[in-house]
Image (cartoon, grey):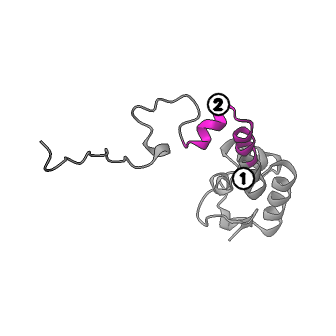
Amino acid sequence: MARIAGVDLPRNKRIEIGLTYIYGIGRSTSNRILQKLNIDPNTNTDKLSESEVNNIRKAIDSECKVEGELRAEVTMNIKRLMDLGSYRGLRHRKSLPVRGQRTSTNARTRKGPKRAAVKKKARVGKK
C-alpha cells in the first residue's frame, strides 16, 4: 500500500484517481504530476514500484501544498476574513452561505437542522 503525504492510497484504483484522495490534489494536478514523471495514469496503485512512489512523493512535496499545510492556510484565510469584519467574514461567523446563495429556502446544509417555531403559552384563568 502506497503512503504519500500521510495518506494511504487505495489499493485497486488507478494511480490517477488514487492521488486525488490526498487533500489538495485533484484530477488535473494528479495528471500533471504523472505526466511529468512519465508514469502511466492507468497503473494500479498497488502495482507501483518503490522508486515510483518515492518520485511521486518528492514531486508532491516540491510542487503542491497538501493536507495539513493547506488546511491550515484555508483556516487562516477564513479567520482573517472574520477578524476584518468583512461581509464574507460575517457570513462565516454566522454559519450562513458565503457565496451569494439564497437562504429563505435551500440553505439547510450550512444552517443545520430546522428549528421548531416557538409556541406561546395560553394564559389560564384570566377573563
Which SS class for mark 2? helix
* Quadrant housing the C terminus: top left
Residue where numbered disc 1 is placed: 71
Q: Quadrant of residue 86?
A: top right
What residue is rendered at 83% in x and 66% in y? 51
Q: Is 6 situated above or below 85? A: below
> What range is drawn magenta here?
76-95
Residue where numbered disc 2 is placed: 87
User: Residue 22: x and y, percent?
Assistant: 68, 56
User: Residue 37: x and y, percent?
Assistant: 82, 51
Give 21 or 94, whichever is nearer the viewer: 94
User: Which one is closest to the eye, mark 1 or mark 2?
Assistant: 2
- The secondary structure making up most of the magenta span is helix
**Alpha carbons under labels 1 and 2: distance apart:** 22 Å
Which SS class for mark 1? helix
What residue is rendered at 39% in x and 33% in y? 105
Type of residue at label 1? Arg
Q: Is 39 situated above or below 84? A: below
What residue is rendered at 82% in x and 46% in y? 36
